[in-house]
Amino acid sequence: MSTNGLTSWAVDLKDVGAIYPFQGTETVLVIILLVFWIGWHVLQTRAETREFEHDLAADKSGDEQRKAIDRY
Amino acid sequence: MEGNLNALTVVFTEFYYWITVVVMFLIHVGFCMYEVGVSRRRNHMHTLMKNTMVIPLVTVTFYLFGWWIYFGFQGGPGITGGIGDAPFAEPWSALMATHLSGPSPDLGVSGDEAALWSRLNGVFWAAFLLFSWTTASIVSGAVIERIRSGAFWMLAVVIGSFAWIIDAAWGWSSQGWMVKLLGYHDAYASGVVHGIAGGFALGVLIVLGPRLGKFRADGTPRDIPPHNRWLVTIGLFLIYTGFWGFYAACNIPIISPEGIAGQITGETWTATNIYLAPTTLSAITFNFIMSLSGGMMAAYVVSKGDAFWTYSGGLAGIISASAGNDLYHPIQALIIAAVVVVVIYKLHYWVERRFKIDDAVGAVAVHGYAGSLGVIIAGFMLWGQPSSPYEGFATINPLGNFLGAVIMFGLLGFLPGYICARILNAFGILRIPRKVELEGLDFEGDETYNASVAEVIAAEKAMV
């Protein structure tokens, strides 16, 4: 058993193709990558929204804003 | 050298490794920026010099004995063979100097070997040496602001010129006993460089103890923020850049089946990994970038956008996939990186809370845990694949890689780190005095600096 079909290097390299493990799962891998990518945007956007909600709730007097502007 | 093709191949290989060495220098620029950025202002110069002096100290000792150990210890010794014969790596050999491969003086090697080593010895030595500096620099970050520089430099020699090069001989060479018997596979050094360095750092940290003020009276940890977050992240960016050179340096750029002299038939020339098994620069480029990306994306989410952990997560992502990045599919590399980064992030804070370990830069997690998990995962992912192009070697398997991870992190990493730190502590030279820690390591240097500044200002004002 071998996860890429090769059990030894007693081969002529011109006859060898893909050597990554679990060949045949490429479509599944691409779907996982798509979910990972889209999922990241969802999680990131939610986290950013929470951060801004915190920012909006803080510093009602505006003192910190003025200090931040002074710091440039 | 016989034949233009052979000559061209050797000279190309020589130039290839030379380029990798120059690129890898950036790792150390990055480490210095990163550590200084993490340290507080009163410790800057000592932190910088503690890491910088790794370069000459590990260089000298790696010239004296480190390079020879790599060839001498591949069989254990006493496991699959005795002490290896490597006259070209002995510090008194003419091949450890300028040489054009002719017969004089008596080199103790064949003409073909002389032709090869006269051109490649210096660049191979330097490539391995840069890995040696890296193992020591990984430890350096974890112990900042309270270790004595002298103690650290002794520890740097132990890991940089001794412990890590033994593990490279055992598990990161074409004839290493771990490769032969265990089927150990760790192509881009998840365990061989990172696992061992993380384990060594943990061993030292346990004896060294946390920085003053790291833990509250009730035992809960305080965050000690870096004085310059921007410098820290750019330092990590430079480490990424140098890591590219490291990846290239782990490959043989071009070799014929005849040159490998293993089981491969035919006449197709190839690049290989350190075990002389075929891979391509293209493959490792795909996987390097995809594992970096997986690590960064996962770290960004799990750390809630923290810049330090996002950059560190990118590094940990690469490290976690490195064991199999010669063979993985790029998306597999990304998934491994993303999963491992979440695990090591959680593990870092759990260990900090549970065992009161103050790892100032997360080195044990980013290098030790990520590297070891990467080795273990590779054992499953690459199960049954050949570990070597030579006959009679075990195939890659989960148990072999698990044992390998234990040997790297535990036997050659944690244990020497812990024992050496205990010895240094027993002599009272491991940790700086409490007063010095509070006033800062740069206290004396700052006094002199400030006095000079004041004198110059006064002198110049008198001229107005």
Image (tube, coloured by chain):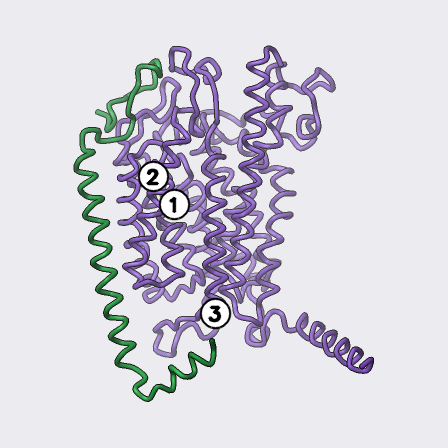
Dot 1 and dot 2 within a common chain: yes
Packing grade of label 2 (10 A; few <14, some 14-19, many >=20) is: some
Name the residue at 49% across, 69% down: B227
Colour assignment, chain B: purple
Q: Which circle marks residue B311 in the picture?
A: none
Q: Place residue B206 in its image quadrant.
A: bottom left
Farthest residue, direction right: B463
Q: Are marks 3 and 2 in contact (CB under 8 Å)?
A: no
The three-letter code of the residue at mark 1 reads: Ile
Q: Are marks 1 and 3 in contact (CB under 8 Å)?
A: no
The three-letter code of the residue at mark 3 reads: Arg
Numbered disc in front, either 3 or 2: 3
What residue is shown with label 2? B403
Q: Position of residue B139 (x, y in %)?
A: 49, 54
Q: Position of residue B250 (x, y in %)?
A: 47, 34
Q: Is residue B246 above or below residue B263?
A: below
Distance from the alpha carbon under mark 1 to that under mark 2: 18 Å
Comes first in the chain, label 3 or label 2 = 3
Chain of the residue that carries numbered disc 2 in the rendered image: B
Q: Which circle marks residue B319 in the picture?
A: 1
Residue B68 visible, this angle:
no
Comes first in the chain, label 1 or label 3 = 3
Q: Which residue is nearer to you in this view: A52 or B208?
A: A52
Q: Which residue is nearer to you in this view: B207 or B397?
A: B397
Q: Place residue B114 in its image quadrant.
A: top right
Which chain gets the green colouring? A
What residue is shown with label 3? B211
Residue B420 visible, this angle:
yes
Chain of the residue that carries numbered disc 3 in the rendered image: B
